[in-house]
Amino acid sequence: MKKFKWHILATAKSIICGKENYNLNTKEISNQATKIVSIMEKHGSDATAVFEKATEICRSLGEVTNDRLKRQAILTEMLEKI
């Protein structure tokens, strides 16, 4: 799972906040960040469930080459499984 570290973060964000992407200078980004922090800071079952779902998505991809990890298509495929 280590090779998916950055993909897991993007997937976790989408699990918590949805797939919408906003510009970094908008209020929506601030709201999303607050929502992510409120779930992750508790280190409880909600945070665990998010990462379990994200790792389940990674495992469902099967063997992934390092070359494939560098492409946007892998992240798109992961987000479609949410």
Image (cartoon, grey):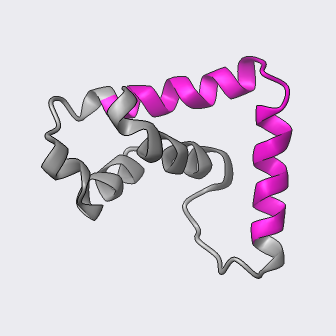
Give the residue displayed 45% in from the left and 46% down from the top: 6
Which of the 4 image quarters holds residue 64?
top left
Is residue 82 something that shows in the picture? no
Magenta stretch containing residue 3, yes or no?
Answer: no
Instruction: Give how far across and how far down residue 58 sits, in percent.
Output: 34, 33
Residue in view at x 37 percent, y 44 percent: 81
Left or right relative to 20: residue 17: right
Q: Nearer the viewer, residue 80 or 62?
A: 62
Residue lying at the far top in this picture: please name it.
45
Asked where in the image residue 47 lies, by quadrant, the reply is top right
**52 relative position to 50: left or right:** left
Total numbered circles: 0
Q: Looking at the image, is 47 positioned above or below residue 33?
A: above
Q: Is residue 30 visible?
A: yes
Q: Position of residue 53 (x, y in %)?
A: 50, 29
In the rendered view, would you say 82 is above or below 54?
A: below
Q: Say above or below: 12 vs 22.
A: above
| Left or right side of 77 for 31 | right
> Which quadrant holds residue 51?
top right
Q: Position of residue 59 (x, y in %)?
A: 30, 26
Q: Which residue is drawn at the image coordinates 23% and 35% (left, top)?
A: 61
Name the magenta segment's main secondary structure. helix
The residue located at (47%, 33%) in the rendering is 54
Q: Quadrant of the N terminus?
A: top left
Residues in magenta, as a range: 29-58
